[in-house]
Amino acid sequence: MLNSLFHSFRSVEGLLVFWAIEHYGKHIFLNDKGAPQIKSSIKQVLDAYWKEVSCRNLHWLKSHDHVGLFSANLFDLFKIANPTLKSDPNLCIIWGTAKDQRNQQFHRLLGLTEPDLFKAWRVYQKGKPEENRNAWEHKVLQCLNSISGQSYPSLKEASKMASLHQGLLNEIDQL
């Protein structure tokens, strides 16, 4: 279950990173560990975002002109750039309970039960494991669809499209 929480959260967070690179790539770079960083130059196009990030990262910004693009910094970029999706009930789970549960579990490395996973995604119904699993998969899919602007009917189809996309990119690189 712990893996399910991490992987479902990371799939949405990973898609948000791809979204950020697609929309604000000239302001983003990967550090030596491959982690995305967003440069202060983003304030040229999203000043409100940089003000928000600066308040949260004052100490770091005394010696750097960028911050890590993950968690709150990543979520705020998406919310400020997409105000109509800021309150999307599926996405609110990502920057709310799922993030909190993921952080708590990650930092303490506690065991995670199925009910914990489903509660983190706000789909838990006592005594209904199959409904919980289906609702959880649906929530993850809805998050991915909201971010990508797609309407995949299932996680399986969304996964196929990701691998197909990567395959096409690899083929293009070979040309």
Image (cartoon, helix red, strand yellow):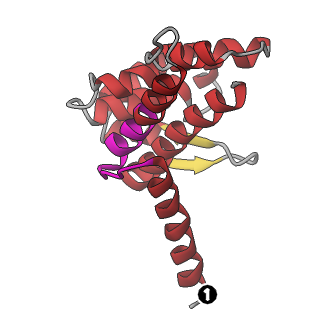
| Location of mark 1 (residue) | 174
Q: Is residue 101 left or right of residue 128?
A: right
Q: Closest to the observer: 69 or 26?
A: 69
Residue 119 shows up from this direction = yes
- Residue 44 inside the magenta-drawn segment: no
- Residue 149 inside the magenta-drawn segment: yes
Residue bounds of the magenta highlight? 139-154
Q: Is residue 38 left or right of residue 89?
A: right
Residue plotted at (47% across, 35% down): 137
Considering only vertical position in the picture, is 106 above or below 7? above
Main SS, magenta residues: helix
Q: Quadrant of the C terminus?
A: bottom right
Residue 68 shows up from this direction = no
Q: Which residue in the rendered view is the most extreme toward the left?
A: 84
Give the residue type that dot 1 points to: Gln
Residue 154 position in % (x across, y down): 42, 49
Residue 4 position in % (x across, y down): 64, 31
